[in-house]
Image (tube, rainbow, N blue to C red):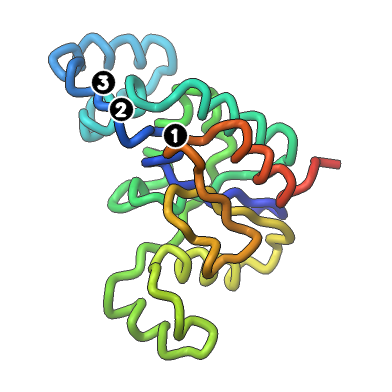
Amino acid sequence: MAEKVLFLDIDGVLQPDSSQKRFKHIDEMDKLYKELFDKYGIDYSPYFKYDVAAVYYDWDEESLRELRRILDTTGAKIVISSDWRQSKPISCLQNFFRIYDMADYVIDYTPDFDYETCKKLRTKDEYKDIYESRCIEILEYIKVHPEIKRWAAIDDLPLNHYLKDNAVMTSTYKLVKVDADKCIEILGVAE
């Protein structure tokens, strides 16, 4: 596990809400699968084709550059907090990030609590006023990983009400320089 962690949402951070390019390329998926296999030696065809197409066609280049800058500058690792973690093994998420040479940064994902689990956790004083389940999932993750010394959460949701100064909300529904600068400030420069 890492001492510095970036809890990463994907939609509204790496994938702008307005980006729908993947739908124009669905008929070309066999060609893309071959291209990705030739380049990475990974068979992406078992993965949901709309996810693979979204990663390849809709993830924003500027946002990916800023993400890389955060990781390289701070030495942080990625823990996925996005809904993309649902029903996907970590190897799948790592393979998605491999397309952008960032697979080694992805180390884990937060738990995905169902409604009843969150309801039960909200009975604890520390969570009684938290209505965003993603915040509870992040805080629970930190609780079971005491080796994490510094962390930031980047999301297009306003998590700062619950996560305070560790939350960064994207300013334009994608990760841009000003958002990356805030993450770097929270995480600190690598030593």
**Residue at point 27%, 33% (across, down):** 51
Q: Is residue 139 left or right of residue 93?
A: right
Report the residue marked by disc 3: 21
Q: Nearer the viewer, residue 47 or 26?
A: 26
Quadrant in which the N terminus is drawn: bottom right
Image height of 73 relative to 112, above or below = above
x then y, percent, for residue 130: 44, 76
Q: Nearer the viewer, residue 162 or 46?
A: 162
Q: Which sits earlier in the primary sequence, circle 2 or circle 1? A: 1
Q: Are marks 2 and 3 in contact (CB under 8 Å)?
A: yes
- Element type at mark 3: helix
State the CA–CA distance, disc 2 to disc 3: 6 Å
x then y, percent, for residue 138: 51, 64
Camera-near label (2 vs 1) is 2
- Amino acid type of the residue that numbered disc 1 sits on in the rendered structure: Leu
Report the residue marked by disc 1: 14
- Amino acid type of the residue that numbered disc 2 sits on in the rendered structure: Ser
Instruction: Using the image, tell me which numbered label, if any, was put on residue 19.
Output: 2
- Amino acid type of the residue that numbered disc 3 sits on in the rendered structure: Lys
